[in-house]
Image (cartoon, rainbow, N blue to C red):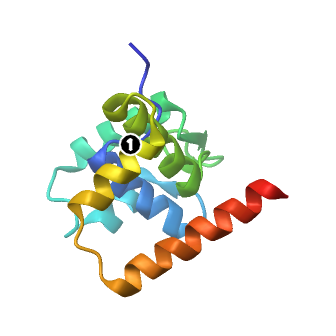
Amino acid sequence: MVRETTPSETEWLVMEVLWNAGTDMTASEIIQSLKGTLNVSARTIRVLINRLLVKGIIRHEVDEKDARVYHYYVVKSKETCLMEKQERFVRNYFGGNSTLAVASFLEKSKLSDEQLSELEQLVGKLKEGQNE
């Protein structure tokens, strides 16, 4: 069993607060930012923060003036977490076959001509990048 190193759906909400802040935050600040977004107790949010610490997605430093206060900061960017989630999803549900994953999504999606054109352009850019 591979240890999970990306945020769960609810942990992702905590990460959005930290990513958007662009600076370190205390647990109280994170809890305050999530009021109205996440309908859970402050204790639950602290559990989510601890899970993110264990996963190595965030770290903390102890406040210089008050050892009871921790300042949490991001270690993994949103882009890195998204990439890792995508890779894990493709590996777990499509046997690592990216083509099969993309084909499955495309077959089930109702794409407009404009969206199909955008995809064609993206594939063209990807081909150009491989030829360089």
Residue at 57% across, 76% down: 121
Q: Among all residues in the image, which is located at the extreme bottom?
A: 114
Percent position of residue 80, x then y: 58, 49
Image quadrant in which you'd find residue 101: top left
The residue identified by callout 1 is 100
| SS state under label 1 | helix
- Indicate left or right for 105 with 99 as reference: left
Q: Among all residues in the image, which is located at the extreme top?
A: 1
Image quadrant in which you'd find residue 15: bottom left
| Between 3 and 123, the one nearer to me in the picture | 123
Percent position of residue 106, x then y: 32, 60
At label 1, counting other C-alpha atoms closer than 10 Å, the crowd grade (few under 14, some 14-19, many 20 or more) is some
Residue type at mark 1?
Leu
Percent position of residue 13, x then y: 33, 57
Residue at 49% across, 59% down: 18
Image quadrant in which you'd find residue 95: top left
| Between 25 and 101, the one nearer to me in the picture | 101
63 above or below 38?
Answer: above
- Image quadrant holding the N terminus, namely top left
| Between 20 and 40, the one nearer to me in the picture | 20
